[in-house]
Image: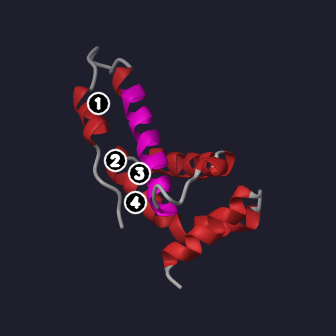
Amino acid sequence: MTGVDAEARLMQRVKHGDEAALRDLYDALAHNVYTLALRMTDSREDAEEVLQDTFVTAYRTADRFDPRRGSVRAWLYTIARNGCRMRLRAQASRPRADGGVAPERLASAASGPQGPD
């Protein structure tokens, strides 16, 4: 049995509201999701928030996961990437202390790195 199979089985349990399965999925993938978020946001605090938001979103929208479209891991990376991009856009649109906007953060949000394997 592969890790992908185990993740898919856990996700099926999460779809049925199994919080223990969510914890197991978190234990298996949190490090990878956090690493992706840290690379994109360059902030431990933001990466931790994206990590938490990713798994909360996954639990709340578990019924939307379709294993025919990709792996659980890829689905979680997509949720995390979108969370990072939204956070970076929000930060880039806030005025800086010098009165400017940080366009480089917005540009990195639009093109963010690919997820870790």
Q: Is residue 37 left or right of residue 13?
A: left
Nearer the observer, 5 or 32: 5
- Find the distance from the CA under tag 4 to the CA under tag 1: 19 Å
Residue 106 is labelled as 1
Query: Is the residue 65 above or below the residue 105 in the image?
Result: below
Q: Mark 4 belongs to which amino acid?
A: Thr
Q: Are marks 4 and 3 in contact (CB under 8 Å)?
A: yes
Q: Are marks 4 and 2 in contact (CB under 8 Å)?
A: no
Q: Earlier in the sequence, mark 4 or mark 1?
A: 4
Residue 35 is labelled as 4
Nearer the observer, 67 or 117: 67
Q: Mark 2 belongs to which amino acid?
A: Met
Q: Mark 1 belongs to which amino acid?
A: Leu
Q: Secondary structure at mark 2?
A: helix
Residue 37 is labelled as 3
Q: Secondary structure at mark 1?
A: helix
Residues in magenta, as a range = 71-91
Nearer the observer, 21 or 11: 11
Residue 63 in view (yes/no): yes
Q: Earlier in the sequence, mark 3 or mark 1?
A: 3
Q: Main secondary structure of the magenta part?
A: helix
- Find the distance from the CA under tag 3 to the CA under tag 1: 15 Å
Q: Secondary structure at mark 3?
A: helix
Tell whether position 27 is magenta. Answer: no
Tell whether position 82 is magenta. Answer: yes
Q: Mark 3 belongs to which amino acid?
A: Ala
Q: Are marks 2 and 3 in contact (CB under 8 Å)?
A: yes
- Find the distance from the CA under tag 4 to the CA under tag 3: 5 Å
Q: Earlier in the sequence, mark 4 or mark 2?
A: 4
Of all residues shown, which one is farthest toward the bottom? 1
Q: Residue at label 2?
A: 40
